[in-house]
Image (cartoon, helix red, strand yellow):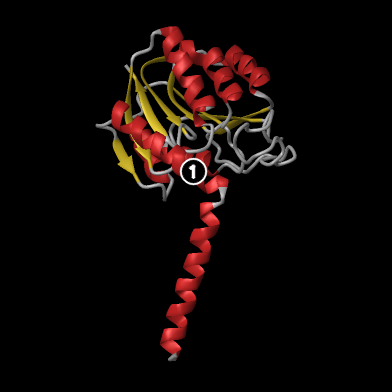
């Protein structure tokens, strides 16, 4: 067997091993299942929405920013600050508010692979531009304090807070400030195990309970969806 044939043989052998491993890997099978369900949801509910690639993630974020009208700009789920810095640099003449405990999730991300402490920064806040104000703490504590000082309607809200409970807290507390032309960017809307029980569920409950009319503007190849309130 020539050197080239040996290389081809090894590649084929490795591929066969990986294929066999995936056949018995539940996480892989769940990903396939959830991807198919997400694709079906897209076909049935947002056939005209723009489709951006999963990477770079900023493609969908930049599109959402381009749709912003008058009002406040908020982000829930700041962590290392990559997205809020990006937003702040794009909107230098506007004040951006970021909310995060910087202590991880308030609970496990059920049905997914992340536990309560996986995202913790042990309380350390990231460096952000001067036009960013960070509100440190759990949403149920920081949102009421924010509302005492700021009363403007919401122009854009980046929801990168993962969980049903966290997303529901935002909608319950600030939903009355989401008016016509408010842009929502929901970072973990679909395409992962148990997606129908988290941010997707919180949004569906919000629109049903408040009879909100909306349109899906865009999505990316991973989990994110951009929505406009009508």
Give the left or right position of residue 102, taking residue 69 as reference: right
Q: Which residue is drawn at 62% across and 41% down?
A: 113
Residue at numbered disc 1: 31
Q: Can residue 69 be seen in this view?
A: yes
Q: Which residue lies furthest to the bottom in this view?
A: 2
Q: Residue at x 56, y 50 (%)?
A: 25
Q: Residue furthest right?
A: 122
Q: Is residue 40 depicted above or below 2 in this figure?
A: above
Q: Residues within 10 Å of mark 1 (few under 14, many from 20)?
A: some
Query: Quadrant of the image for the N terminus?
Result: bottom left
* Residue 221, quarter of picture: top left
Q: Is residue 152 visible?
A: no
Q: Where is residue 69 in the image (x, y as percent from the top left)?
A: 35, 24
State how many labels appear.
1
Query: Quadrant of the image for the C terminus?
Result: top left
Residues 44 and 11: in front is 11
Q: Residue furthest top?
A: 210
Residues 148 and 200: in front is 200
Q: Position of residue 147 (x, y in %)?
A: 58, 14
* Residue 212, quarter of picture: top left
Residues 71 and 77: in front is 77
Q: Where is residue 56 in the image (x, y as percent from the top left)?
A: 42, 50
Residues 144 and 191: in front is 191
Q: Is residue 193 depicted above or below 176 in this figure?
A: below
Secondary structure beneath dot 1 equals helix
* Residue 77, quarter of picture: top right
Q: Position of residue 169 (x, y in %)?
A: 58, 18
Q: Residue at x 44, y 18 (%)?
A: 204
């Amino acid at each position: 067997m020539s050197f080239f044939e040996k290389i081809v043989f090894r590649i084929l052998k490795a591929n066969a091993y990986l294929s066999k491993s995936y056949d018995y890997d539940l996480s892989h099978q769940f990903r396939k299942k959830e991807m198919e369900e997400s694709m079906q949801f897209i076909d049935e509910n947002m056939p005209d929405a723009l489709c951006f690639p999963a990477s770079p993630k900023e493609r969908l974020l930049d599109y959402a920013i381009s749709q912003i009208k008058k009002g406040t700009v908020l982000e829930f789920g700041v962590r290392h600050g990559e997205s809020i810095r990006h937003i702040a640099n794009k909107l230098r003449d506007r004040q951006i508010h970021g909310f995060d405990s910087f202590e991880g999730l308030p609970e496990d991300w059920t049905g997914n692979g992340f536990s309560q402490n996986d995202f913790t920064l042990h309380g350390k806040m990231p460096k952000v531009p001067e036009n960013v104000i960070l509100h440190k703490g759990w949403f149920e504590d920081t949102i009421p304090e924010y509302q005492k000082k700021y009363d403007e309607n919401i122009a854009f809200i980046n929801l990168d807070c993962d969980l049903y409970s966290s997303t529901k807290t935002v909608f319950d507390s600030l939903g009355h400030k989401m008016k016509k032309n408010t842009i929502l960017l929901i970072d973990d809307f679909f395409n992962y195990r148990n997606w129908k029980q988290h941010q997707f569920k919180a949004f569906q409950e919000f629109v049903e309970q408040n009879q909100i009319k909306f349109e899906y503007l865009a999505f990316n190849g991973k989990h994110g969806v951009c929505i406009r309130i009508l």
